[in-house]
Amino acid sequence: MTRLISALAVLLVGFSVVEARGVLIPTDRTMPPLTLLKHRVEVAIEDQVAVTKVEQTFRNPAPRPLEATYVFPVPRGASVREFAMWVDGKRVPGELVEAAKARQIYTDIVRRTYDPGLLEYIGQDVLQLRVFPVPPNGEQKIELSYTSIAKKDHDTAEYIYPLRMDARSTTTLEDFVLQLTLKSQQPIANIYSPSHPISINRTSDHAAVVGFEKGRAALDRDFQLFWTTGGQDVGVTILPHKPTTTEDGYVLLLLSPRPELAESQQVPRDLVFVLDTSGSMREDGKMDQAKKALKHCLDGLRDIDRFAVLNFATTVNRWRDGLTAVTPEQIDAAKKWIDRLEPSGGTAIDDALQQALALRPGDSGRAFTIVFLTDGKPTVGETNPDRILANVARHNVGQVRIFTFGVGHDLNAAFLDQLAENTRAAGTYVRPGEDMEAKVSSFFAKISKPVLADLRLTVSGAVTLSEMYPPTLPDLFHGGQLVVLARYHGSGTTQLTLSGSIGTQKREYVYTLDFPSKTDDKRFVEDLWARRKVGYLLEQIRLNGEKKELVDEVTALAKKYGIATPYTSYLVVPDEPVPIPMPRPRPPGVPPFPGPDVPVALQGGPKSPIGAAEGFRKVADLAKELKDRSNLSGAREAFEQQKLAGAAQAPGAAGAQAQADALRQKAALDEARAAFSGRDLRRAQENRLGVDLSLQISQLKGEAQSRRAAARQAAQRQMVEVGGVWIDEGFDPKMPQLVVKALSDGYFRLLDKRPELKEVFQLGNYLIYVTPSGTALIIDLNDGKEQLSDEEISKLFAKK
C-alpha cells in the first residue's frame, strides 16, 4: 500500500492540454492544439449589451505550414447577435454552430486532447472557422468580435468570458489582459468578480473600468462578473445560493458607496500615526522604509482632516502636544521631524497606545483613527499582551479604530490581530524583503475616506440571517466594497436594513431583496461562506486553544470544501495550476502527444495495477484511509515535492514559486497543528509561524474569490483528489465495480443518458464515483469497457 500511495503521489505530465478559451486545432491529427502565446480581451458593456473583442496569438512549432480549425465556445447564457473574425487583419467568414451540432465538435476535441475539462461546454454554441496556412515555425493571430446580451436577474446582471475551470490547465506564454468598460443609464451600485481579483476604476456613478492582467496567466476558470444598478447612496447586491428547499441557503451581500458621494457625506477624520523606533528597526533598512511610508500617508491627508505623529522606543515622544490641522506648512514640518528620528532602545507598546488614545478630543463628531506600525513585541512597561488589550478597551471610549502594521517576524501577530479586530479595524504584515512603503501606502489609501461607520445589517419578514461573516461589520470606505457571507432561513421578498453613522449623525438605508426558495447556479457563495467560517473558527483555536467541538467542525468543513487547515494540511494546493513542462516516458498504448495526465503507476505497462480492474481495486483501498485522511498527508507531500521538482526545471522556473508557496503553507499548518495539540499557543501566535498563520487565517476570513481545492462536490457526491486520482468518499472496495474506459463510446453514452455526470468526468480521466445503485463506476484512460448499453446504464443509476 505504501508503494501504491507513493505511485499515486506523482503525476506524469508532459505537453500542454487544451482550454476552451478559443483553440486552434490542426487538421493533422498527429499534431496537438497550437500553443497560445498572447490572449487579450476588450469588452464594452452598455446596459446589458456586451461587445467582446478577442485577440489571440498562437505559435506553430512545426517546420511546415498547417491547416487548422479555430474553435471558440459561446459563453453560457449569452445570446450572440452578430460576430466577425479576422485572420492577420483580414475579415474571414466564420460559422456559428448551434448547441446540438456543436456537441460533436466538443466531443471530438475532448477525445483528441484527452482533456475532460472541456465537457463543461457541451450544450453550448460554438464559433468556428478554417485557417490556412498557419506559417511554419511562426505565429498566427486571430481576432474575434461578438455581441451578446448579458443575463439579468432583477437588478443584477452577469457577464461571462469562457476560460474554463480545470485543475490541469496551462498558462499563456506571455500574458493575459482583460479590460472591460461598463456603462449604465441607471447608477451602478456594485461590481464583483467571484473568479478573479479585478481592479475597478469607478469613473462616475454610471461608468466603470474593470481590469485583470497577469503575465503567464493560468487560464483555469471562466471570467465571471456581476454588477447591480440602483440609486441609493450605498448600494446592496444579493447573490443567493440555495440548492435545496429543505435546508438553509447561503447568501453573499455586496455593499458599496456610490462614487459620486457628496463631500458632505464624507467624514472628517483625526489621525494619529504611531511609529516604532526601537533598536530593531535599524535592521534591513526598516527605519528608512517606515519613514517613507509614513510621509506618503501624510501626503494623503485631506484638508478637512487633523493629525498627530508619535514615535516610541523606551519612551514615547510626540511631534506636537495635540492634533494639528492639515496645511502644507504643517505637513512639511512633520516630515522634517520624521527625518530626524533614529532607532534605539526598547519597545513601549502599551505606553504608546495609551498616549495615542489620549489625543482624542471629546465628542467632536469626527472619526478618530490610529495607524500603528511596529516590528517587535512589548519589552518596556506593561508587556503582557492580554493586559495591554484590556487597557486599550478601557480607554477606548470613543470607538477609535486602530489599524496595525507588523514589520518582519519578531512580533506577536495574534496580539496585533486582536488589537485591530477589537476596534473594528484591520491589520496587515510586511515580510522581510517586501516593499514597506508600497504596502503601507496602498493600505492607507483604501481607508483614507470613510463614509459609514458602526454598520449593522438586519432583515424583516419571513427571512432570517445567521452565521454572518464578518460577524462585526467594519467601516465602509469611499471606493471600497464590503463582502458579507451568511446563511439564510426562509424565502420571499424581504426588507434588509443597513444602519450606521456619519460622525454624530445616524444613517439608515432600506432595500427590498428577493431570497429564493431554491437556486443552484452560484455554488461559489457556499464555498466562500465555508472558507470564512473556517477562518473564524481557526482564529478562536489559535487564541484560546483546542476544543473538541471547534476542531471537529473545522475538520468537517475543511474536508467537505477542500480547505487546507492545520487539521487538513494535505489539502494544500498551489494558488494557480502550474503544469510540469518536463516530458516523461510514456507507457505502451498511451499516445505520446499531446498526452494526458497519467499516474506514474501506468509506467509498468498496459497491465500495471492502476490500468486493470483488479489493480484499480487495490488503488481503491485508499477509501479505507479516507475515514482518516491524515494518513494521506504523506502522499500529498510527495506529490507536491514531485511537482515542485518538475516546476523548478521549467524555462524561467515558472511554476516553482507557486509550488514553493504551497509547500511553505503546508509546513506552517503542520507546525500549527503541533502547537495547538501541544497547548503551546505562543508558538502559534508569535514570530514567523505567528505571521504565517495570521496571513493564512486572515485570507480565509476575508475570502472573496473562489479557489482551487483538492476536494469538491460533483453530482451531489463528495470527491477527494489523491495524486491525480479522484475518489468518492463513500466508496468501499467491497462494492460492485464497473470499469469504463475514459473518452470511449461507452463513456460518452453515459454522458448522453446522465448529463449530471459532466461535473464528475470534468475532474479527470482517473476517478471512482459511487452511483445511486451502490456500484463503483471507475473511469480509467487505459482500460475498461468501451461500449455500454442503455440497460446497463439504467441499472447503474437505479437506487438501491
Image (cartoon, rainbow, N blue to C red):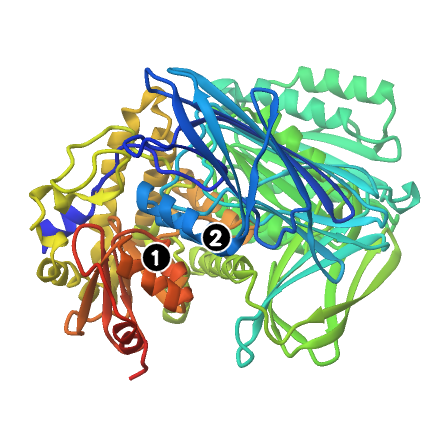
- Name the residue at 34% across, 24% down: 653
Residue 787, image x, y percentages = 23, 62
Q: Nearer the viewer, mark 2 or mark 1?
A: 2
Describe residue 214's horizontal placement relative to residue 107 as left or right.
Answer: right
Dividing the picture into quadrants, the one containing residue 574 is top left
Residue at which label 2 appears: 101
User: Can residue 435 be seen at all in this image of the molecule?
Assistant: yes
Residue 536, image x, y percentages = 51, 59
Residue 273, image x, y percentages = 70, 33
Report if the CB atoms under discs 2 and 1 are less than 8 Å apart.
no
Kind of residue at badge 2? Lys
For the N terminus, the image quarter is bottom left
Q: Residue furthest front?
A: 93
Disc 2 secondary structure class: helix
Q: Nearer the viewer, residue 39 or 171?
A: 39
Residue 796, image x, y percentages = 28, 74
Of pointers 2 and 1, the one earlier in the residue sequence: 2
Residue at which label 1 appears: 761
